[in-house]
Image (spheres, rainbow, N blue to C red):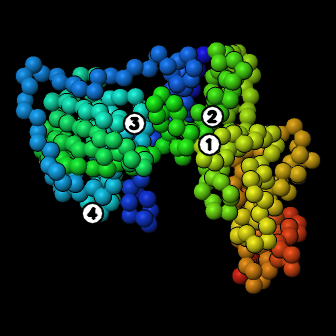
Amino acid sequence: MNIDKKSIIQIVILVTLVAGAGVYYLTTQEGGLGFLAEMLPGGEEKQSAPSTTATSAPAKPAEPEIPAQPAKGQVAGNSFVPEAAMLEGGVLAFVQSKEPQSAILIRLAAPKWETPVGKKFKYAPAAGANVPIVTVSRMEGGEMKQQAVTDKYTLVLEFDQEKDRRLAGKLSLALAGEPKTTLAGTFEAEIKGFRFVDGKPDLSSDSTDTLEYLALKELLKDDPDKQVEVVAFRDGRYTTDAAEKNRVGYLEVEYRVGQGNAEVKRFQFVKNPEWKIQNTLALNEIDEAHPQMIPGPKDAPARVLAYLAAKRLETDVKKKSPTKGVYGASFVTRQNAKNKIGVAEIGYKLEPNGEVIKVAYLFRLKPNGWTLERELSTKEKVNVESGKIEKR
């Protein structure tokens, strides 16, 4: 199997301050699953784990004593008491959301998708190519400051056993230089994202990486050795909407086989209890128009309006542009039950890189529920507060 690594965007770690929530959220972004070359049948032998113990100097300094208390320390000389720890994609993150907002991320020198149960890492001091990358992030003057450290630090990191998708452990970390950055003590990290357990993919993991794994596996099911180049993964998402019986997801894959033309496939996913492909959509079919559970009069109006608008747009595109697809559809709905009026505004494209087309549909609340009345002209807009159609 040949997966073109040029189509893969390298992993970038983002520590983003969530507006209004006052907390950091750790994500790992990857534009494609190049790592599947090592994961799918026939590729396992290519993936080898580096040594989990590393010393870079002949002299062996005494191992630091790790305090038996929740991990705390300093970031750039300021107090650092993380209230959350997460492990995702081979990155262990410690996050402090209170002032001064800061985080310490440790990219482990081990397979990215493996949970390091019972493993110990020792770098005293860290040096060479096969050491973790430590990233220190902090808010300073309203801006995010980041520092990546690849050597001249000491780290002892021990993991215990996993329980309920949480992994306990302890560590001692000290970066060289002033002002000081240190972290020492015990922790319990929440395990997030796609991973492998006992050499097998954990398909219960809520992650777009899980959906990408299943999609690429589907593309290769007839011939695992065929040459596949992933051009792009688009619109990967999953939802925990209580209105759905199970969690559902969506992903669009653009790819080519060998030197052939690019093709696009759209997959809908369902989780019960593991993620699996539920349905494949045509290019002129819209995810929102084919939900697992069709919304009824008792469902949230926003969900009903989006569904009805998606069905109408799908029908219109098939009629007006039968050779085109619908790409990147986004929905904004507004409604007022008192005035019995609603509107759904949609932006979409007929080509992946085409211009955004906008359309709006008018809804009325009838005794049997919301009904799509008509498409609005480009010179009309709905005032849901007054219940009137106004001119733009």
Residue 289's place in the image compared with 170, above or below, is below
> In whole angstroms, how far apart are the C-alphas of marks 3 and 2?
20 Å
> In whole angstroms, how far apart are the C-alphas of marks 1 and 4?
38 Å
The residue depicted at 63 percent of the width and 60 percent of the height is 241
Q: Which of marks 2 and 4 is nearer the N terminus?
A: 4
Q: Nearer the viewer, residue 350 or 40?
A: 40
Residue 149's place in the image compared with 35, above or below, is below
Q: Where is residue 247 in the image (x, y as percent from the top left)?
A: 63, 52
The residue depicted at 29 percent of the width and 33 percent of the height is 119
Graded by Cα atoms within 10 Å as few (under 14), some (14 to 19) or many (20 or more), the crowding at tag 2 reads some
* Residue type for callout 3: Thr
Q: Position of residue 127 (x, y in %)?
A: 20, 25
In the picture, the quarter occupied by the N terminus is top right
Residue 115 disc label: 3
Residue 214 disc label: 2
Graded by Cα atoms within 10 Å as few (under 14), some (14 to 19) or many (20 or more), the crowding at tag 1 reads many
Q: Is mark 2 on a helix, strand or loop?
A: helix
* Residue type for callout 4: Glu
> In whole angstroms, how far apart are the C-alphas of marks 4 and 3?
31 Å
Q: What element carries label 4?
A: loop
Graded by Cα atoms within 10 Å as few (under 14), some (14 to 19) or many (20 or more), the crowding at tag 3 reads many
Q: Which of marks 1 and 3 is nearer the N terminus?
A: 3
CB within 8 Å, label 1 to label 4: no
What number of labels is visible? 4
